Amino acid sequence: MSKLFSPIKIRDLEVKNRLWVSPMCMYSCENQDGVVGDWHLVHLGSRAIGGAGMVIAEASGVNPEGRISPWCPGLWDDSQIAPWKKITDFIRAAGSTSGIQLAHAGRKGSAHRPISGTGSVPVDQGGWETYSATSEAFEGLAAPRELRADELGQLVADFAAAAKRAKTAGFDLVEIHAAHGYLLHQFLSPITNKRTDQYGGTLANRARLLLEIVAAVRQAVGDQMPVLVRFSATDYVADGWDQTQTNEVAGWCKDQGADLFDLSSGGLITGVKIPTGPGYQVDFAKSTKTATHAEVAAVGQITNSEQAEQILQDGLVDVVLVGREFLRVPYLGLRAANQLDAEVDWPWQYERGRWPNA
């Protein structure tokens, strides 16, 4: 029996299989107001039709300054709920479930999207002044200002409010983005966090903001809705953020109500050598699972059904997140089920397209 196409239950949510769509930036809110539209409906909806058990929407700003670019979506305003709900309703009708990644870009915000240029977007063109744990710039972007300690309570409240809107919008889970060099990663890593107050210095202090956010999000969504956290397991440099710190903080997040950890890597600084290859981040997830006894997801160069199945059969992780391969093959779930001889429901509209041996 295929493990990839076996269900998984997290709190009150049962997901039909363990092949999930990883959150991927689309930079396609053309009015620069954080409101999603037809592109997002077709992009996310097609993967639900295509057999993914869970479709996680891209990094969405918890406030306007939390976006990576002016073209990124958000959940900082009630006007953004209904367009998201149109998408979650479609995904549910297609037999899948949906999640959203709640994020703040910090010093990596106000950036151009890939087709509009490089560097920071000027304020008079829709950009904004960024902020971070300290005032050191990310290479190629404008320097941020350092957040004051008395501003962090509002940031925690913004995450909680966005999580509550996500629930109203019909999402089945939320993921807190603490990876890839964005704001929460900027607080976690000793490379970017040089603060001397209660949010800097020791590991407990550097993790304080994330833990406050996890606790606030859990309270906002209640006891039934799963809460995920994405970490970068390493900065790939000496004296930076690493697997040991990741595992420790993941355990603390679990104590605050997080359910599953999604393990990626890198993104904090440029110029590092990342040893990529098939499934190159699986061991990060395995380590966190061993340390915390929590459920974990692997992501990164998982590109075929046999590979994904073997990762799960080996007991290394609980869920496989796939990104680029879902961009290439929107109906990857249906194809993978055929390849693994798994019995799955097809959209009735597509029954004529079943493979002969399915």
Image (cartoon, grey):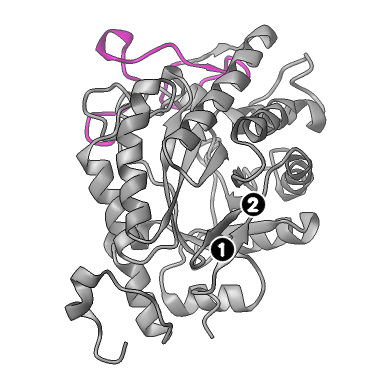
Numbered label attached to residue 260: 2
> In this rendering, does residue 307 appear at all?
yes
> Real-space Cα distance between discs 1 and 2?
9 Å
Residue assigned mark 1: 319
Query: Residue at point 44% right, 37% down?
Result: 59
Front one among 91 and 323: 91
Residue drawn at the location 32% of the way across and 44% of the way down: 87
Tell me if 201 is positioned left or right of 328 in this view.
right
Name the side, left or right, on which 213 lies relative to 158.
right
**Rendered location of residue 213, percent (x, y):** 65, 28
Q: Is residue 323 above or below residue 79?
A: below
The amino acid beneath tag 1 is Val
Mark 2, other Cα within 10 Å: few <14 / some 14–19 / many ≥20? many
- Quadrant (top left, top right, bottom left, bottom right) of the C terminus: bottom left
Is the residue marked by circle 1 packed among few (<14), some (14-19), or many (20+) residues within 10 Å? many
SS class, disc 1: strand
Quadrant housing residue 332:
bottom left
Task: Please provide percent x and percent y for residue 205.
Answer: 79, 25
Magenta-colored segment: predominant secondary structure:
loop
Q: How many marks?
A: 2
The image quarter containing residue 53 is bottom left
- In the foreground, 261 or 346: 346
Question: Is 124 in the magenta?
Answer: yes
User: x, y percentage for residue 70?
Assistant: 32, 23
The dot on residue 182 is: none
Are the residues tagged 1 and 2 within 8 Å (C-beta)?
yes
For the record, the magenta segment spans 114-142
Q: Is residue 78 above or below residue 228?
A: above
The percent position of residue 11, horizontal first and vertical second, equals: 65, 53
Q: Residue at the spot x=53%, y=30% of the render?
A: 164
Query: Could one spot residue 189 in this view of the protein?
Result: no
**Going 19% across and 69% down the picture, which residue do you hit?**
349
